[in-house]
Image (tube, helix red, strand yellow):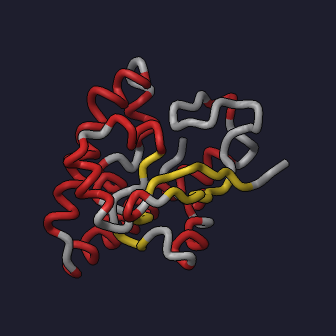
Amino acid sequence: MDIFYRSRRIGKNGRVFWLYKFRTLKLNSDENQFASPEKYVKFGRILRKTKIDELPQVWNFIKRDINFFGYRPEEQRTWDILPNNVKDLLSKHRPGIIDLSSLHFFDEEKILQLGHPHEIYWKVIRPMKLAFQMFYIQNRCFLLNLAIIWIYLKKVIKSLCQKE
């Protein structure tokens, strides 16, 4: 079985690249964030819960596809529906591994389980993620990045200590 999941993403200047993660869902599953529990590979839930599934993005960082901090890179289907002024702003900056929406939606899967996942994502979560992206781009600085990493690490540690 292929242990890596890859997804076409849009980066700086509209450049398309492959974003890598550890595979958390079975190969025959629909690869998206709206997964049901039976679709996970043996340790898939743990990988997602601890964010270890994101580790292969270090390769994307080394290749300079992404920065450590910055808005999450968009999939083509999401990029295509963004307003042109948003695409223009995003394409001026390199996306990242971690951002403000990574903090706010750390447990996104739990939120999606509260109702119809696609509707919740596109009507509630996605607009808020876009607002976080715009805020970060307009206000990024060393102290903001320091706060993001501090809060992110606290959330990972807390999730490791919680029982399911």
In the displayed structure, 73 sits above or below 97; it is: above
Give the x, y percent position of residue 149.
34, 71
Residue 87 percent location from the top left of the image:
29, 50
Kindly tell me whether residue 61 is visible in this rendering: yes
Which residue occupies 61% across, 59% down? Answer: 20
Between 72 and 42, the residue placed more toward the observer is 72
Q: Nearer the viewer, residue 149 or 6?
A: 6
Q: Is residue 93 left or right of residue 141?
A: right
Q: In the rendering, at what x and y percent does residue 32 appear?
A: 56, 36
Residue at image coords 25%, 46%? 130
> Residue 134 or 164: which is nearer the viewer?
134
Residue 75 is left or right of residue 3, and the answer is left
On the image, which quarter does residue 35 sit in? top right
- Count of all numbered marks drawn on residues in the image: 0
The residue depicted at 48 percent of the width and 50 percent of the height is 162
| Residue 120, image quadrant | top left
Residue 127 image offset from top left, x and y in percent: 25, 37
Q: Is residue 158 visible?
A: no
Relative horizontal placement of residue 28, taking residue 48 as reference (left or right): right
